Amino acid sequence: MDRVPDKAFETIGFGQEGRAVFATDPAHSRGRLAEERESRTRTPYQRDRDRIVHSTAFRRLKHKTQVFFSHESDHYRTRLTHTIEVAQIARALARALRVDEDLSEAIALVHDFGHTPFGHTGEDVLNECMAAHGGFDHNAQALRVVTKLERRYAEFDGLNLTWETLEGLVKHNGPLRDAETGADLAGPVPQTILNYCELHDLEIDRHAGLEAQLAAIADDVAYNTHDIDDGLRAGLLTFEMLADVRLARDIIAEVDGLYPGLDDNRRGHETTRRLMTRMVEDVIVQTQANIARLAPQSAGDVYRAGETIARFSDEMAELEAELKAFMFKNMYRHPDVMRVRAQAEDVVRDLYAKFIAAPGEMGGRWAGQMERLDEDAVARRVSDYLAGMTDTFALAEHRRLFDRTPELR
């Protein structure tokens, strides 16, 4: 893929220019479910960001798995470091396109709040366990966390985030229902989302604002690049293997041409940072082209566009799909990773069964008033408790409750 010419970036923002007409305007936020007096020193989206960062759920991300379990090395990404990288990219994209940086950052920081311990492994098992009770979806769980489960404020449960941050959280990957037919687009919409929409309609049949779209594609850029870095560090990937992937091959050749004989650590970093730059620049150029074609004159026009505006070019999308396929085959489904995943599955499955049979073992407020709950509500409370666990706490609870706990190595 040829390098984008400098002229393509002559009109991007650097944080000094005015807001674009299609940006989400914090002065016209649709507000919060529980009415509050607005801050005199922060916009609504800055306030959202601050509440997210100060939440318990945010701190827990430090000890939740991204790909490799955190105890294997202090150098691998965790869910928290991944989230920070996504937020950094989202903010850079928002700045370049002159939309609200704080809103993009807030959505990026909150987007993984619903993830379970042990990465997608925990989510898959919990969804299986909850099949008869509405299933488990990490986006819906994130909504539960920020609207119900966080308990910090005197006047409301959750964080009472703005409509724009919540709709970005729920719809950053696109609409959940077809605007014309009302049909669900990616399986049944989780009941948690439907219940909240009855109180505060998130318009799940429309696209989210550009700020949320940028947070979503920042997530793709972040994990595509940092997972390569972690894979090289773990020895699951090699430069020779990456040479089979067109996007990586071209960049490795560029690095080797500039710095022959570079040690593997620097070679890996130079490769991944150039890969990130290539993808970010592609998003900026393609999104600018889409904006020029659609000519949105307001944030509402972005919602009504009927397509995702912030995206890769067709060429980059093809290269990125090839990279993803390579990563699934060689890293995410590597026998060593799958072996540890199987052990983690057993931990989550054991804990779920134990807490369903003996909910009092959860302790504290989680175990209170269980006799008033029906079967579905008990299962959802157990699911909430498990989903909030860090890897380390889940393993500690398993050791407390069972005679033998895997080491996850």
Image (spheres, rainbow, N blue to C red):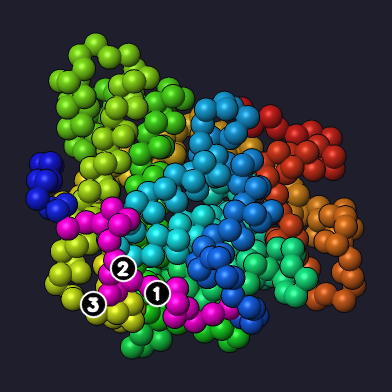
Q: Which residue is mark 2?
A: 19
Quick check: 358 left or right of 131? Answer: right
> Which image quarter is the C terminus in?
top right
Cα separation between marks 2 and 1: 8 Å
Disc 3 on helix, strand or loop?
Answer: loop
Identified by mark 1, the residue type is Asp
Dot 3 surroundings within 10 Å: few (below 14), some, or many (20 or more)? some
**Which one is in front in this view, the residue at disc 3 or the one at disc 1?**
1
User: Measured from the top left, where is residue 91 in percent x and y?
Assistant: 39, 54
Disc 2 on helix, strand or loop?
Answer: loop
The disc at residue 101 is none
> Which image quarter is the N terminus in?
top left
Disc 1 on helix, strand or loop?
Answer: loop
Cα separation between marks 3 and 1: 14 Å
* Figure disc tally: 3
Q: Is residue 126 above or below residue 339?
A: below
Identified by mark 3, the residue type is Pro
The disc at residue 25 is 1
User: Measured from the top left, where is residue 315 in percent x and y?
Assistant: 16, 51
Picture residue at 57% right of the left edge, 27% below the top: 74
Could you tell me if the residues under marks 3 and 1 are in contact, i.e. CB atoms within 8 Å? no
Q: Which residue is mark 3?
A: 296
User: Measured from the top left, where is residue 68 in percent x and y?
Assistant: 53, 35
Quick check: 65 left or right of 151? Answer: left
Q: If you read the primary sequence from the N terminus, does the residue marked by circle 3 or circle 2 appear first? A: 2
Picture residue at 85% right of the left edge, 39% below the top: 400
Q: Reply yes or no: does residue 136 show up in magenta.
A: no
The image quarter in which residue 113 lies = bottom right
Which residue range is magenta in the image?
11-32
Q: If you read the primary sequence from the N terminus, does the residue marked by circle 2 or circle 1 appear first? A: 2
Picture residue at 31% right of the left edge, 68% below the top: 19
